Amino acid sequence: MKLSLLVLDETLAICSLKRDSPLPDWATSSDFYSITRTYDELSIVCPQDKVPAGVDINKNWRCLKVQGPLGFSITGILASLSMPLASEGVSIFVFSSYDTDHIMVKQYELDKAVEVLQKAGHTVQYQK
């Protein structure tokens, strides 16, 4: 499966809060964020400049958005992206929306990730 991806401009952070934490205002103060509440934690992906001090944070992530929308019946999307990256030792963090998938890689591995994905036959463009 050959996909088209867009590298988003912003540098993102992945934050972890206690599972019963209220949704903080800073988490929703930008145009791009993802929030997941599980039985164990509240995870937030957002621009890292929005995260206040004292929050459990993993910084310096870049996001590659799969150009969608993607149908729910399509299989192998994440495998076609994660397998080549894993084979080259590139760690990822993935989240999905209704229409598409997002692959995040550390800033220092972005160039390598783009090269690996292009070598695997995917098209990668940068946000303008």
Image (cartoon, rainbow, N blue to C red):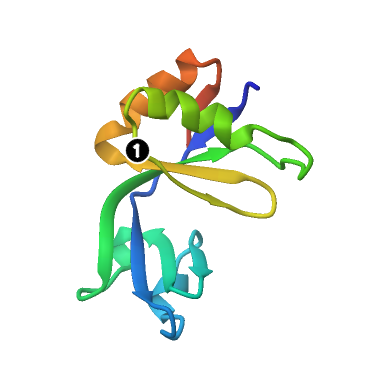
User: Going 65% across and 32% down the picture, which residue do you hit?
Assistant: 76
Decide: is 64 above or below 99: above
| Residues packed near mark 1 inside 10 Å, few (<14), some (14 to 19) or many (20 plus) | some
User: Going 35% across and 69% down the picture, which residue do you hit?
Assistant: 16
Q: Mark 1 points at which residue?
A: 91
The picture places residue 99, in percent across and down from the top left corner, at 69, 49
Residue 24: name its quadrant.
bottom left
Secondary structure under badge 1? Answer: loop
Left/right placement of residue 61 relative to residue 28 reads left
User: Going 58% across and 44% down the picture, which residue do you hit?
Assistant: 101
Of the pair 99 and 95, the residue shown nearer to us = 95
Left/right placement of residue 115 relative to residue 79 reads left
Residue 125 showing in the rendered view: no
Left/right placement of residue 88 relative to residue 99 reads left
The picture places residue 5, in percent across and down from the top left corner, at 55, 32
Residue 105: name its quadrant.
top left
Residue extending farthest front: 39
User: Going 38% across and 49% down the picture, which residue do you hit?
Assistant: 10
**Mark count:** 1
Amino acid type at circle 1 is Ser
Left/right placement of residue 98 relative to residue 110 reads right
